[in-house]
Amino acid sequence: MTVRKPEPVPVGKQGRQQIICELIVTHEVHSQEQLVELLSEKGIETTQTTLSRDLTELKVFKGPNGYTLPQSELSVPPTTSELKRFLETLLVSIDQASNLVVLKTRPGRAQILGYELDRGGIPLVVGTLAGDDTLFIATRSEQDAHQLIEELQELAGVKR
């Protein structure tokens, strides 16, 4: 059985860079070759030279867990659909400890999810603290924590 690659999809620079950002957030990307392959799987053909320029323009940096996007203070808050996508792809489990909501993520992704939740302006979120794969979300009360869990579960499409 032969696996066929999707037909190349014509996207401009902006579209390609948006997809690169999505891939970096949803996958643990450790090399440009891996990113070229992931783009190819989506039907986007690009050269390593073009990809290198894109990564420079996007100010992507390489850390111990692969490529990471910059965290701009001027960035626009995520939409509900963007937050939903982050939760669906990064969230492993969710739990409550008093007024704290504890999220487990894929390795190296807790800070990204915490950043997105901080930017989201969710009134129940007082603040976040992220490690490698664990994110603590502070709320004002146990009831707020419970309500936040319900909202996050609904967004992520999971049950407790």
Image (cartoon, rainbow, N blue to C red):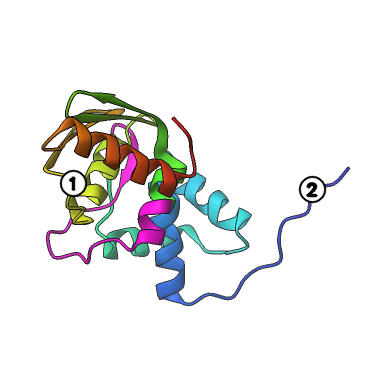
Disc ID at residue 124: 1
Q: Nearer the viewer, residue 98 or 82?
A: 98
Range covered by the magenta-colored residues: 64-84
Q: Quadrant of the N terminus?
A: top right
Asked if residue 30 shows in the view, the reply is no
Asked if residue 154 shows in the view, the reply is yes
**83 within the magenta span:** yes
- At x 21%, y 35%, the residue is 143
**44 within the magenta span:** no
Q: Say above or below: 123 vs 47.
A: above
Depth check, mark 1 against mark 2: the one in front is: 1
User: Which amino acid type is shown beneath numbered disc 1?
Assistant: Leu
Taken as a whole, is the magenta stretch helix, strand or loop?
A: loop
The percent coordinates of residue 45 (x first, y second) are 58, 64
Q: Is residue 7 left or right of residue 74?
A: right
The percent coordinates of residue 81 (x first, y second) are 41, 60
Disc ID at residue 3: 2
